[in-house]
Image: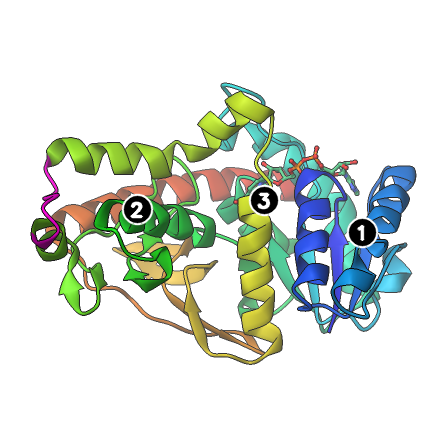
Amino acid sequence: MKVGIIGAGSVGAATAFALVMKGVARKVVLIDANQKKAEAEAADIAHAAPFAYANKIKAGTYDDLKGCEIVIVTAGANQKPGETRIDLLGRNVKIFESIIPQIAKAEPNTTLIITANPADIMTEVAIKLSGFPKERVIGSGTVLDTSRFRTLLGYHLGVSPQSVHANVIGEHGDSEVLVWSAGDAGTVSLDKLAEEVGKPFNAETKAKIDDGVRNAAYKIIDGKGATYFGIAGALTRICAAITNNEYAILTVSSHQEDVEGVKGVCVSLPTVLGKRGVHKVIYPVLNTEEKAALKKSAEAMKEYSDQALAMISAQ
Ligand code: NAD
């Protein structure tokens, strides 16, 4: 599979490295406004590739996207300490206006994966700017947040995070919803297993895990300036699901017709992914509190998406 990555910054470079070292992509094209940076990252990763797979990675131009099954868009401003993802909106809409039409022209049959923040809103912006069918414009969404949730649950319960089935849905950001009610490990509910291992969940432990998931990026950015390994893992997983036509269920973001009464908005829900991109969205069974939280999250995304789409048509 050939993958294009727009933006060879922290996220783009880490993702290219992960795709190459896992053998998910056989050809990777890195494009960045800073051509020298794209070339340097491509060369550095190319020197690691022979230790893994016979892959080719190079810096390129939009014309080189021809034949890419997937194009990942990471180009954009990233959060500075103290900034929310929403604070990036205006700057990243402008960047998308310059890059999305060029991708669509170079490879009209590709699937776009949007990861620049605020990712859900930028996915809506990319749908409009590309003119692509909605199922082929996917946000990396809460795939990373779901991994953070499973990791902390696995540590708490003393089982592999891969054996924990629990999801984060809604916005990739402050209003995201941790679905505690439907989680399980080994067919046993999270609450029951926590009791069995002698570490029952109480309000305090749940709040601590919630904070560890919801505020993970803020803490990592405070410590090292950016997050990139986690999202690189998430993007590599999404690419594998698409290229292998897996029908895997991942909490990517895509355009939903109706989320708790909110019409036409991109948020993450459990989604079946394969060659065509989004094959099906599985609407989760939620308790009253989670439903209300999802509605609030979708309302926030709708409000900001409308603002972002208005910025485009204002041009
Ligand atoms: P970065 O600053 O390291 O890299 C961004 C790159 O984009 C730079 O190399 C820059 O030259 C390039 N760029 C800017 N404008 C461009 C244009 N018009 N055309 C081509 N390239 C252009 O930032 P980063 O840490 O890699 O983060 C990138 C984005 O990803 C940010 O918006 C960040 O918030 C987001 N992010 C999302 C997630 C997620 O889970 N969705 C996780 C981490 C970061």
Which percent across, then down, holds residue 10? Answer: 69, 38
Which percent across, then down, holds residue 315? Answer: 71, 39
In the image, taking residue 106 as reference, residue 10 lies left or right, namely: left
Res 313 → quadrant? top right
Q: Which residues are magenta?
A: 196-202
Answer with mark 3 or mark 2, whichever residue precedes in sequence. Answer: 2
Q: Does the magenta-highlighted stretch encompass residue 145? A: no
Q: Which mark is residue 45?
A: 1
Q: In this figure, which residue is indicated by the disc labeled 3?
A: 229
Q: How many marks?
A: 3
Regarding mark 3 in the picture, which secondary structure is present there? helix
Q: Amino acid at mark 2?
A: Tyr
Residue 103 appearing in the image: yes
Quadrant location, ligand no. 1: top right
Which percent across, then down, holds residue 147? Answer: 41, 52
Q: Which mark is residue 155?
A: 2
Answer with mark 1 or mark 2, whichever residue precedes in sequence. Answer: 1
